[in-house]
Protein backbone atom coordinates (compact mmCIF):
# COMPACT_ATOMS: atom_id res chain seq x y z
CA UNK A 1 0.00 0.00 0.00
CA UNK A 2 2.91 2.31 0.70
CA UNK A 3 4.15 1.84 -2.85
CA UNK A 4 0.76 2.59 -4.35
CA UNK A 5 0.61 5.66 -2.18
CA UNK A 6 4.04 6.73 -3.42
CA UNK A 7 2.95 6.31 -7.04
CA UNK A 8 -0.24 8.31 -6.50
CA UNK A 9 1.64 11.07 -4.66
CA UNK A 10 4.20 11.15 -7.46
CA UNK A 11 1.46 11.42 -10.06
CA UNK A 12 -0.03 14.39 -8.25
CA UNK A 13 3.42 15.98 -7.90
CA UNK A 14 3.77 15.47 -11.65
CA UNK A 15 0.94 17.95 -12.14
CA UNK A 16 3.10 20.68 -10.62
CA UNK A 17 6.03 19.69 -12.83
CA UNK A 18 3.75 19.78 -15.86
CA UNK A 19 2.85 23.35 -14.91
CA UNK A 20 6.57 24.22 -14.69
CA UNK A 21 7.00 22.65 -18.11
CA UNK A 22 3.92 23.92 -19.95
CA UNK A 23 5.20 27.49 -20.29
CA UNK A 24 8.60 26.25 -21.35
CA UNK A 25 7.04 23.97 -23.94
CA UNK A 26 4.81 26.73 -25.30
CA UNK A 27 7.69 29.20 -25.66
CA UNK A 28 9.86 26.65 -27.42
CA UNK A 29 7.00 25.46 -29.60
CA UNK A 30 6.03 28.88 -30.90
CA UNK A 31 9.37 30.66 -31.24
CA UNK A 32 12.09 28.02 -30.82
CA UNK A 33 13.30 29.93 -27.79
CA UNK A 34 14.90 28.02 -24.92
CA UNK A 35 14.18 30.12 -21.88
CA UNK A 36 16.88 29.55 -19.27
CA UNK A 37 15.20 32.09 -16.98
CA UNK A 38 11.97 30.11 -16.82
CA UNK A 39 12.63 28.69 -13.35
CA UNK A 40 13.51 32.12 -11.99
CA UNK A 41 10.34 33.53 -13.51
CA UNK A 42 8.40 30.85 -11.60
CA UNK A 43 10.14 32.00 -8.40
CA UNK A 44 9.46 35.64 -9.30
CA UNK A 45 5.76 34.75 -9.57
CA UNK A 46 5.93 33.05 -6.16
CA UNK A 47 7.41 36.20 -4.61
CA UNK A 48 4.84 38.39 -6.33
CA UNK A 49 2.20 36.11 -4.85
CA UNK A 50 3.83 36.42 -1.43
CA UNK A 51 3.88 40.21 -1.56
CA UNK A 52 0.31 40.37 -2.79
CA UNK A 53 -1.01 38.07 -0.08
CA UNK A 54 0.89 39.91 2.65
CA UNK A 55 0.03 43.41 1.51
CA UNK A 56 -3.61 42.83 0.66
CA UNK A 57 -4.27 40.07 3.18
CA UNK A 58 -5.82 37.83 0.53
CA UNK A 59 -5.63 34.10 -0.10
CA UNK A 60 -2.81 33.02 -2.49
CA UNK A 61 -5.36 31.67 -4.99
CA UNK A 62 -7.10 35.03 -5.05
CA UNK A 63 -3.70 36.69 -5.49
CA UNK A 64 -3.49 34.81 -8.76
CA UNK A 65 -6.04 37.27 -10.16
CA UNK A 66 -3.34 39.93 -9.79
CA UNK A 67 -0.17 37.91 -10.34
CA UNK A 68 -1.26 36.13 -13.54
CA UNK A 69 -2.09 39.33 -15.48
CA UNK A 70 1.04 41.00 -14.05
CA UNK A 71 3.25 38.12 -15.20
CA UNK A 72 1.52 38.14 -18.60
CA UNK A 73 2.29 41.85 -18.91
CA UNK A 74 5.91 41.27 -17.92
CA UNK A 75 6.09 38.50 -20.51
CA UNK A 76 4.77 40.68 -23.31
CA UNK A 77 7.13 43.54 -22.54
CA UNK A 78 10.09 41.18 -22.04
CA UNK A 79 9.46 39.50 -25.38
CA UNK A 80 8.94 42.67 -27.40
CA UNK A 81 11.57 44.70 -25.59
CA UNK A 82 14.39 42.20 -25.37
CA UNK A 83 13.85 38.62 -26.49
CA UNK A 84 12.55 39.35 -30.01
CA UNK A 85 15.88 41.01 -30.74
CA UNK A 86 17.73 37.81 -29.90
CA UNK A 87 15.74 35.55 -32.23
CA UNK A 88 17.24 34.58 -35.56
CA UNK A 89 19.02 31.75 -37.28
CA UNK A 90 21.52 31.48 -34.44
CA UNK A 91 20.15 29.73 -31.31
CA UNK A 92 22.92 31.01 -29.06
CA UNK A 93 21.85 34.65 -28.43
CA UNK A 94 18.49 33.77 -26.80
CA UNK A 95 20.26 31.21 -24.59
CA UNK A 96 22.83 33.74 -23.45
CA UNK A 97 20.33 36.53 -22.92
CA UNK A 98 17.90 34.38 -20.91
CA UNK A 99 20.83 33.05 -18.88
CA UNK A 100 21.78 36.63 -18.08
CA UNK A 101 18.16 37.35 -17.24
CA UNK A 102 18.20 34.40 -14.85
CA UNK A 103 21.23 35.82 -13.01
CA UNK A 104 19.65 39.27 -12.83
CA UNK A 105 16.35 37.91 -11.51
CA UNK A 106 18.01 35.81 -8.82
CA UNK A 107 20.07 38.73 -7.57
CA UNK A 108 17.20 41.19 -7.71
CA UNK A 109 15.05 38.80 -5.66
CA UNK A 110 17.92 38.29 -3.23
CA UNK A 111 18.22 42.05 -2.85
CA UNK A 112 14.49 42.56 -2.40
CA UNK A 113 13.53 39.54 -0.27
CA UNK A 114 16.84 38.28 1.24
CA UNK A 115 17.94 34.63 1.12
CA UNK A 116 15.56 33.55 3.92
CA UNK A 117 13.14 30.83 2.84
CA UNK A 118 9.59 32.11 2.52
CA UNK A 119 6.25 30.42 2.18
CA UNK A 120 2.75 31.46 1.31
CA UNK A 121 -0.02 30.64 3.74
CA UNK A 122 -3.03 29.05 2.11
CA UNK A 123 -4.81 28.16 5.35
CA UNK A 124 -6.58 24.87 6.05
CA UNK A 125 -6.32 23.65 2.46
CA UNK A 126 -2.62 22.97 3.03
CA UNK A 127 -3.25 20.22 5.56
CA UNK A 128 -6.70 19.05 4.50
CA UNK A 129 -6.93 15.55 3.11
CA UNK A 130 -9.52 13.16 1.75
CA UNK A 131 -9.57 9.38 2.02
CA UNK A 132 -9.63 7.74 -1.39
CA UNK A 133 -9.86 3.95 -1.54
CA UNK A 134 -7.68 3.32 1.47
CA UNK A 135 -5.23 6.10 0.63
CA UNK A 136 -5.19 9.51 2.20
CA UNK A 137 -4.62 12.21 -0.38
CA UNK A 138 -3.87 15.84 0.33
CA UNK A 139 -6.42 18.29 -1.03
CA UNK A 140 -3.68 20.66 -2.22
CA UNK A 141 -1.85 18.06 -4.35
CA UNK A 142 -5.20 16.92 -5.78
CA UNK A 143 -6.13 20.50 -6.56
CA UNK A 144 -2.70 21.12 -8.10
CA UNK A 145 -3.11 18.14 -10.40
CA UNK A 146 -6.63 19.20 -11.36
CA UNK A 147 -5.35 22.71 -12.13
CA UNK A 148 -2.54 21.26 -14.25
CA UNK A 149 -5.03 19.21 -16.28
CA UNK A 150 -7.28 22.25 -16.67
CA UNK A 151 -4.37 24.49 -17.71
CA UNK A 152 -3.16 22.02 -20.31
CA UNK A 153 -6.68 21.50 -21.64
CA UNK A 154 -7.02 25.28 -21.80
CA UNK A 155 -3.73 25.72 -23.65
CA UNK A 156 -4.72 22.93 -26.00
CA UNK A 157 -8.01 24.72 -26.67
CA UNK A 158 -6.27 28.05 -27.30
CA UNK A 159 -3.75 26.39 -29.59
CA UNK A 160 -6.15 24.42 -31.75
CA UNK A 161 -9.49 26.20 -31.49
CA UNK A 162 -8.85 29.96 -31.45
CA UNK A 163 -7.51 32.50 -33.91
CA UNK A 164 -4.70 33.31 -31.47
CA UNK A 165 -3.61 29.66 -31.52
CA UNK A 166 -3.85 29.65 -35.30
CA UNK A 167 -1.55 32.66 -35.35
CA UNK A 168 0.88 30.87 -32.99
CA UNK A 169 1.01 27.79 -35.20
CA UNK A 170 1.27 29.72 -38.45
CA UNK A 171 4.05 31.97 -37.17
CA UNK A 172 5.88 28.95 -35.82
CA UNK A 173 5.56 27.17 -39.19
CA UNK A 174 6.80 30.05 -41.33
CA UNK A 175 7.07 33.54 -39.94
CA UNK A 176 7.64 35.20 -43.34
CA UNK A 177 4.45 33.79 -44.80
CA UNK A 178 2.60 34.56 -41.57
CA UNK A 179 3.65 38.21 -41.99
CA UNK A 180 2.07 38.11 -45.46
CA UNK A 181 -1.21 37.22 -43.74
CA UNK A 182 -0.95 40.47 -41.80
CA UNK A 183 0.33 38.88 -38.59
CA UNK A 184 2.89 40.98 -36.76
CA UNK A 185 5.49 38.44 -35.66
CA UNK A 186 6.72 40.60 -32.77
CA UNK A 187 3.19 40.86 -31.39
CA UNK A 188 2.39 37.15 -31.87
CA UNK A 189 5.59 36.22 -30.00
CA UNK A 190 4.74 38.76 -27.30
CA UNK A 191 1.34 37.14 -26.85
CA UNK A 192 2.92 33.68 -26.66
CA UNK A 193 5.29 34.82 -23.91
CA UNK A 194 2.42 36.55 -22.09
CA UNK A 195 0.42 33.32 -22.13
CA UNK A 196 3.43 31.28 -21.03
CA UNK A 197 4.13 33.58 -18.09
CA UNK A 198 0.46 33.58 -17.07
CA UNK A 199 0.84 29.80 -16.74
CA UNK A 200 4.12 30.42 -14.89
CA UNK A 201 2.20 32.57 -12.42
CA UNK A 202 -0.08 29.62 -11.62
CA UNK A 203 2.95 27.35 -11.25
CA UNK A 204 4.73 29.88 -9.01
CA UNK A 205 1.77 30.34 -6.67
CA UNK A 206 1.23 26.58 -6.33
CA UNK A 207 4.95 26.11 -5.69
CA UNK A 208 4.95 28.80 -3.02
CA UNK A 209 1.94 27.30 -1.27
CA UNK A 210 3.33 23.77 -1.37
CA UNK A 211 6.89 24.35 -0.17
CA UNK A 212 9.14 27.08 1.08
CA UNK A 213 11.19 28.87 -1.52
CA UNK A 214 14.11 31.27 -1.74
CA UNK A 215 15.66 33.17 -4.67
CA UNK A 216 17.98 30.29 -5.57
CA UNK A 217 15.43 27.53 -6.24
CA UNK A 218 14.62 28.55 -9.81
CA UNK A 219 17.34 26.45 -11.40
CA UNK A 220 15.94 23.16 -10.13
CA UNK A 221 12.41 24.13 -11.31
CA UNK A 222 13.89 24.80 -14.76
CA UNK A 223 15.51 21.35 -14.80
CA UNK A 224 12.26 19.62 -13.72
CA UNK A 225 10.41 21.54 -16.41
CA UNK A 226 12.95 20.63 -19.07
CA UNK A 227 12.91 16.98 -18.06
CA UNK A 228 9.11 16.82 -18.19
CA UNK A 229 9.10 18.41 -21.67
CA UNK A 230 11.76 16.06 -23.04
CA UNK A 231 10.25 12.92 -21.48
CA UNK A 232 6.83 13.80 -22.89
CA UNK A 233 8.11 14.75 -26.32
CA UNK A 234 8.53 18.23 -27.75
CA UNK A 235 5.47 20.07 -28.96
CA UNK A 236 2.88 17.86 -27.27
CA UNK A 237 1.20 19.42 -24.24
CA UNK A 238 -0.53 16.25 -23.04
CA UNK A 239 2.83 14.54 -23.46
CA UNK A 240 4.27 17.21 -21.20
CA UNK A 241 1.73 16.28 -18.53
CA UNK A 242 2.70 12.62 -18.91
CA UNK A 243 6.35 13.63 -18.68
CA UNK A 244 5.68 15.52 -15.48
CA UNK A 245 3.87 12.52 -14.01
CA UNK A 246 6.69 10.12 -14.92
CA UNK A 247 9.22 12.47 -13.36
CA UNK A 248 7.10 12.90 -10.23
CA UNK A 249 6.52 9.15 -9.82
CA UNK A 250 10.23 8.40 -10.32
CA UNK A 251 11.08 10.93 -7.63
CA UNK A 252 8.61 9.66 -5.04
CA UNK A 253 9.56 6.03 -5.71
CA UNK A 254 13.22 6.98 -5.38
CA UNK A 255 12.49 8.74 -2.12
CA UNK A 256 10.59 5.66 -0.92
CA UNK A 257 13.72 3.54 -1.37
CA UNK A 258 15.99 6.11 0.21
CA UNK A 259 15.18 9.78 0.87
CA UNK A 260 18.53 10.73 -0.69
CA UNK A 261 17.51 9.17 -3.97
CA UNK A 262 14.55 11.40 -4.73
CA UNK A 263 16.19 13.78 -7.20
CA UNK A 264 18.59 11.18 -8.53
CA UNK A 265 15.74 8.81 -9.42
CA UNK A 266 14.03 11.57 -11.38
CA UNK A 267 17.17 12.39 -13.34
CA UNK A 268 17.80 8.69 -14.03
CA UNK A 269 14.27 8.28 -15.38
CA UNK A 270 14.91 11.28 -17.63
CA UNK A 271 18.23 9.91 -18.87
CA UNK A 272 16.72 6.48 -19.55
CA UNK A 273 13.97 8.04 -21.69
CA UNK A 274 16.55 10.20 -23.47
CA UNK A 275 18.71 7.17 -24.21
CA UNK A 276 15.90 4.83 -25.28
CA UNK A 277 13.57 7.31 -26.98
CA UNK A 278 15.38 10.60 -27.66
CA UNK A 279 12.32 12.09 -29.33
CA UNK A 280 10.35 11.64 -26.11
CA UNK A 281 7.45 9.30 -25.40
CA UNK A 282 4.75 11.24 -27.25
CA UNK A 283 6.36 13.55 -29.81
CA UNK A 284 4.09 15.64 -32.01
CA UNK A 285 3.25 13.68 -35.14
CA UNK A 286 5.50 14.85 -37.94
CA UNK A 287 3.63 16.53 -40.76
CA UNK B 1 -2.89 55.56 -68.61
CA UNK B 2 -4.99 56.39 -65.53
CA UNK B 3 -3.33 57.13 -62.21
CA UNK B 4 -1.43 53.98 -61.24
CA UNK B 5 -2.45 52.09 -58.10
CA UNK B 6 1.01 50.56 -57.68
CA UNK B 7 4.32 51.97 -58.89
CA UNK B 8 7.96 51.08 -58.65
CA UNK B 9 10.44 53.92 -58.91
CA UNK B 10 14.03 53.02 -59.76
CA UNK B 11 13.80 49.96 -57.55
CA UNK B 12 17.22 48.50 -56.68
CA UNK B 13 16.58 45.43 -54.58
CA UNK B 14 19.37 43.57 -52.80
CA UNK B 15 19.68 40.12 -51.28
CA UNK B 16 22.52 40.72 -48.84
CA UNK B 17 25.44 41.81 -50.99
CA UNK B 18 23.83 40.58 -54.16
CA UNK B 19 21.88 43.14 -56.18
CA UNK B 20 18.90 41.46 -57.82
CA UNK B 21 17.09 44.43 -59.37
CA UNK B 22 18.54 47.50 -61.08
CA UNK B 23 16.43 50.64 -61.39
CA UNK B 24 13.15 48.92 -62.20
CA UNK B 25 10.28 51.29 -63.04
CA UNK B 26 6.74 50.00 -63.22
CA UNK B 27 3.25 51.47 -63.20
CA UNK B 28 0.21 49.28 -62.65
CA UNK B 29 -3.28 50.72 -63.11
CA UNK B 30 -6.24 49.63 -60.99
CA UNK B 31 -7.90 46.53 -62.42
CA UNK B 32 -5.02 45.68 -64.72
CA UNK B 33 -3.69 42.16 -65.08
CA UNK B 34 0.02 42.40 -65.77
CA UNK B 35 2.37 39.53 -66.55
CA UNK B 36 5.99 39.59 -65.48
CA UNK B 37 8.10 37.12 -67.37
CA UNK B 38 11.76 36.35 -67.44
CA UNK B 39 14.25 33.54 -67.11
CA UNK B 40 15.39 31.99 -63.84
CA UNK B 41 17.26 34.55 -61.77
CA UNK B 42 15.90 37.52 -63.70
CA UNK B 43 14.57 39.02 -60.46
CA UNK B 44 10.88 38.22 -60.76
CA UNK B 45 10.44 36.77 -57.28
CA UNK B 46 12.58 39.55 -55.80
CA UNK B 47 10.25 42.05 -57.41
CA UNK B 48 7.16 40.50 -55.80
CA UNK B 49 8.86 40.10 -52.41
CA UNK B 50 9.84 43.78 -52.55
CA UNK B 51 6.26 44.84 -53.21
CA UNK B 52 4.89 42.54 -50.46
CA UNK B 53 7.36 43.93 -47.92
CA UNK B 54 9.33 40.73 -47.35
CA UNK B 55 12.31 42.58 -48.75
CA UNK B 56 13.01 46.03 -47.37
CA UNK B 57 13.80 48.86 -49.77
CA UNK B 58 13.80 52.63 -49.64
CA UNK B 59 10.30 53.80 -48.84
CA UNK B 60 9.81 55.86 -52.01
CA UNK B 61 10.85 53.05 -54.32
CA UNK B 62 7.45 51.39 -54.00
CA UNK B 63 4.28 53.49 -53.90
CA UNK B 64 0.80 52.13 -53.44
CA UNK B 65 -2.34 54.28 -53.64
CA UNK B 66 -0.10 57.31 -53.15
CA UNK B 67 1.70 55.96 -50.05
CA UNK B 68 5.41 55.16 -49.99
CA UNK B 69 5.45 51.52 -48.80
CA UNK B 70 8.92 50.36 -49.85
CA UNK B 71 10.21 50.20 -46.28
CA UNK B 72 7.00 48.93 -44.68
CA UNK B 73 6.83 45.60 -42.80
CA UNK B 74 5.07 42.81 -44.68
CA UNK B 75 2.16 42.58 -42.23
CA UNK B 76 1.43 46.29 -42.62
CA UNK B 77 1.58 45.97 -46.41
CA UNK B 78 -0.92 43.10 -46.12
CA UNK B 79 -3.28 45.31 -44.12
CA UNK B 80 -3.12 47.89 -46.90
CA UNK B 81 -4.51 45.35 -49.34
CA UNK B 82 -1.64 43.66 -51.15
CA UNK B 83 -1.62 39.84 -51.06
CA UNK B 84 1.05 37.47 -52.33
CA UNK B 85 0.55 33.90 -53.48
CA UNK B 86 4.10 32.75 -52.80
CA UNK B 87 6.21 30.52 -54.99
CA UNK B 88 5.96 26.89 -53.94
CA UNK B 89 2.56 27.41 -52.22
CA UNK B 90 4.06 27.65 -48.73
CA UNK B 91 0.97 26.55 -46.84
CA UNK B 92 1.13 26.29 -43.07
CA UNK B 93 1.67 22.57 -42.36
CA UNK B 94 0.31 22.77 -38.79
CA UNK B 95 -2.98 24.20 -40.04
CA UNK B 96 -5.85 22.37 -41.69
CA UNK B 97 -7.02 23.42 -45.13
CA UNK B 98 -9.81 25.53 -43.67
CA UNK B 99 -7.49 27.12 -41.10
CA UNK B 100 -5.07 28.05 -43.87
CA UNK B 101 -7.94 29.86 -45.56
CA UNK B 102 -9.19 31.44 -42.33
CA UNK B 103 -5.80 32.86 -41.46
CA UNK B 104 -5.81 34.58 -44.84
CA UNK B 105 -8.67 36.71 -43.55
CA UNK B 106 -6.65 37.89 -40.55
CA UNK B 107 -6.44 41.46 -41.85
CA UNK B 108 -10.23 41.66 -41.54
CA UNK B 109 -10.56 43.63 -44.77
CA UNK B 110 -14.09 43.81 -46.14
CA UNK B 111 -14.80 42.59 -49.63
CA UNK B 112 -16.44 39.95 -51.76
CA UNK B 113 -14.26 37.00 -50.75
CA UNK B 114 -15.31 34.66 -47.96
CA UNK B 115 -14.83 31.01 -47.06
CA UNK B 116 -18.00 30.13 -48.97
CA UNK B 117 -16.91 31.99 -52.06
CA UNK B 118 -13.48 30.34 -52.08
CA UNK B 119 -15.18 26.94 -51.68
CA UNK B 120 -17.42 27.92 -54.58
CA UNK B 121 -14.35 28.62 -56.69
CA UNK B 122 -12.54 25.43 -55.64
CA UNK B 123 -15.24 22.93 -54.50
CA UNK B 124 -12.67 20.18 -53.84
CA UNK B 125 -11.29 22.24 -50.95
CA UNK B 126 -14.59 22.05 -49.12
CA UNK B 127 -14.43 18.25 -49.18
CA UNK B 128 -10.88 18.42 -47.83
CA UNK B 129 -11.35 21.26 -45.37
CA UNK B 130 -10.41 19.34 -42.22
CA UNK B 131 -7.35 17.62 -43.70
CA UNK B 132 -3.82 18.76 -43.01
CA UNK B 133 -2.77 21.00 -45.87
CA UNK B 134 0.25 18.78 -46.54
CA UNK B 135 -1.95 15.82 -47.48
CA UNK B 136 -3.32 17.61 -50.55
CA UNK B 137 -1.98 17.23 -54.08
CA UNK B 138 0.17 20.01 -55.50
CA UNK B 139 -2.69 21.46 -57.51
CA UNK B 140 -5.02 21.44 -54.50
CA UNK B 141 -2.32 23.09 -52.40
CA UNK B 142 -2.04 25.81 -55.03
CA UNK B 143 -5.82 26.31 -54.79
CA UNK B 144 -5.46 26.76 -51.01
CA UNK B 145 -2.60 29.24 -51.52
CA UNK B 146 -4.70 31.26 -53.95
CA UNK B 147 -7.77 31.02 -51.72
CA UNK B 148 -5.73 32.10 -48.71
CA UNK B 149 -4.60 35.25 -50.54
CA UNK B 150 -8.16 35.98 -51.73
CA UNK B 151 -9.52 35.69 -48.17
CA UNK B 152 -7.62 38.92 -47.40
CA UNK B 153 -9.84 40.69 -49.95
CA UNK B 154 -6.82 42.38 -51.48
CA UNK B 155 -6.91 45.23 -53.96
CA UNK B 156 -3.74 43.91 -55.55
CA UNK B 157 -2.87 40.22 -55.76
CA UNK B 158 0.59 38.97 -56.67
CA UNK B 159 0.96 35.46 -58.12
CA UNK B 160 4.43 33.93 -57.99
CA UNK B 161 4.92 30.95 -60.33
CA UNK B 162 1.53 29.38 -59.73
CA UNK B 163 2.17 26.74 -62.41
CA UNK B 164 5.51 25.64 -61.04
CA UNK B 165 5.74 21.87 -60.56
CA UNK B 166 2.13 21.19 -61.56
CA UNK B 167 0.80 18.91 -64.31
CA UNK B 168 -0.42 20.71 -67.45
CA UNK B 169 -4.03 19.69 -66.87
CA UNK B 170 -3.89 21.17 -63.36
CA UNK B 171 -2.25 24.35 -64.63
CA UNK B 172 -5.04 24.70 -67.16
CA UNK B 173 -7.74 24.28 -64.53
CA UNK B 174 -6.14 26.91 -62.32
CA UNK B 175 -5.73 29.38 -65.17
CA UNK B 176 -9.33 28.70 -66.19
CA UNK B 177 -10.57 30.15 -62.90
CA UNK B 178 -8.25 33.20 -62.94
CA UNK B 179 -10.74 35.35 -64.91
CA UNK B 180 -13.28 34.72 -62.13
CA UNK B 181 -10.79 36.10 -59.64
CA UNK B 182 -9.64 39.21 -61.46
CA UNK B 183 -13.00 39.74 -63.15
CA UNK B 184 -14.41 42.05 -60.50
CA UNK B 185 -11.70 44.65 -60.72
CA UNK B 186 -8.88 43.14 -58.69
CA UNK B 187 -5.44 44.20 -59.86
CA UNK B 188 -3.07 41.30 -60.48
CA UNK B 189 0.61 40.79 -61.14
CA UNK B 190 1.41 37.37 -62.52
CA UNK B 191 4.96 36.11 -62.44
CA UNK B 192 5.45 33.07 -64.65
CA UNK B 193 8.02 31.08 -66.49
CA UNK B 194 5.24 29.60 -68.62
CA UNK B 195 5.03 32.56 -71.00
CA UNK B 196 2.02 31.50 -73.02
CA UNK B 197 -0.07 31.00 -69.85
CA UNK B 198 1.00 34.38 -68.52
CA UNK B 199 0.22 36.16 -71.77
CA UNK B 200 -3.15 34.44 -72.14
CA UNK B 201 -4.59 36.10 -69.03
CA UNK B 202 -2.77 39.46 -69.03
CA UNK B 203 -3.27 42.71 -70.89
CA UNK B 204 0.25 44.00 -70.43
CA UNK B 205 3.62 42.40 -69.95
CA UNK B 206 6.98 43.28 -68.46
CA UNK B 207 9.97 41.17 -69.32
CA UNK B 208 12.87 41.12 -66.87
CA UNK B 209 16.39 40.19 -67.81
CA UNK B 210 19.15 40.12 -65.24
CA UNK B 211 17.35 42.52 -62.94
CA UNK B 212 16.36 45.07 -65.57
CA UNK B 213 13.17 45.63 -67.57
CA UNK B 214 14.10 44.50 -71.06
CA UNK B 215 10.69 44.84 -72.67
CA UNK B 216 7.25 46.19 -71.83
CA UNK B 217 4.04 46.72 -73.72
CA UNK B 218 0.48 45.59 -74.36
CA UNK B 219 0.26 41.82 -74.71
CA UNK B 220 -1.47 41.99 -78.08
CA UNK B 221 1.09 44.30 -79.69
CA UNK B 222 4.23 42.39 -78.75
CA UNK B 223 5.52 39.73 -81.09
CA UNK B 224 6.93 36.40 -80.08
CA UNK B 225 10.29 37.42 -81.52
CA UNK B 226 10.40 40.53 -79.34
CA UNK B 227 9.76 38.38 -76.29
CA UNK B 228 12.40 35.83 -77.22
CA UNK B 229 14.95 38.61 -77.59
CA UNK B 230 13.98 40.28 -74.33
CA UNK B 231 13.82 36.98 -72.49
CA UNK B 232 17.15 35.55 -73.51
CA UNK B 233 18.97 38.73 -74.44
CA UNK B 234 20.07 37.31 -77.78
CA UNK B 235 19.72 38.64 -81.29
CA UNK B 236 18.73 42.34 -81.36
Image (cartoon, coloured by chain):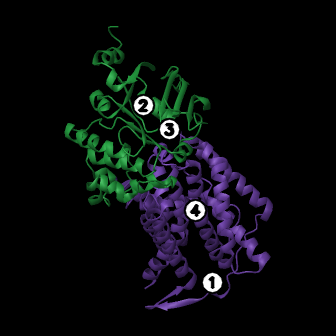
Chain colours: A purple, B green
Q: In the rendering, which numbered label is found on residue A48?
A: none
* Mark 2 crowd level (few <14, some 14–19, many ≥20, 10 Å Cα): many
* Mark 3 crowd level (few <14, some 14–19, many ≥20, 10 Å Cα): many
Residues at circles 1 and 2 in contact by the CB criterion of under 8 Å = no
Give how far across and how far down residue A114 sits, in percent.
79, 64
The residue drawn where x is 40% and y is 59% is: A273
* Mark 1 crowd level (few <14, some 14–19, many ≥20, 10 Å Cα): some
Measure the C-alpha gap from mark 4 to mark 1. Answer: 27 Å
> Considering depth in this image, is B83 or A226 the residue closer to the camera?
B83
| On screen, residue A69 above or below A138 | above
Measure the C-alpha gap from mark 3 to mark 2. Answer: 11 Å
Label 4: which secondary element: helix
User: Is there one chain holding both mark 3 and mark 2?
Assistant: yes
Q: Is residue B163 visible?
A: yes
Where does label 2 land, which residue?
B45
User: Is there one chain holding both mark 4 and mark 1?
Assistant: yes
Measure the C-alpha gap from mark 1 to mark 2. Answer: 63 Å
Where does label 3 land, which residue?
B52
Give how far across and how far down residue B67 sits, in percent.
60, 37
Chain label for disc 3:
B
User: Is there one chain holding both mark 2 and mark 4?
Assistant: no
- Figure quadrant of residue A40: bottom right
Where does label 4 land, which residue?
A195
> Considering depth in this image, is A249 or B74 the residue closer to the camera?
B74
Mark whose residue sits in front, 4 or 3: 3
| On screen, residue B47 above or below A165 | above
Amino acid sequence: MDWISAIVQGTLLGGLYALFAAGLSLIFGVMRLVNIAHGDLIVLAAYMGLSTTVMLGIHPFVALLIVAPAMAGIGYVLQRGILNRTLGDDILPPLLVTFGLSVILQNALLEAYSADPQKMNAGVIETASVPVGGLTLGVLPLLTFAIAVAVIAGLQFIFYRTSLGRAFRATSDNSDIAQLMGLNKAHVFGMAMALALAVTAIAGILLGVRTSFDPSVGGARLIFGFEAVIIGGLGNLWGTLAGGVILGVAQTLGAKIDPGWQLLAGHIAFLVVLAVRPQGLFPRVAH
Amino acid sequence: MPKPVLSLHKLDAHYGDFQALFGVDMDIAAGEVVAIIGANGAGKTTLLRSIAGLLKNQAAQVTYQGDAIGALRADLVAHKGIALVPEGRQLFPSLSVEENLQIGAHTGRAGPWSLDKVYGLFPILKERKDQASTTLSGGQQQMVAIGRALMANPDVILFDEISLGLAPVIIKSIYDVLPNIVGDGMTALIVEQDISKALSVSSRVYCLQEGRVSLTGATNTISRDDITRAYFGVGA
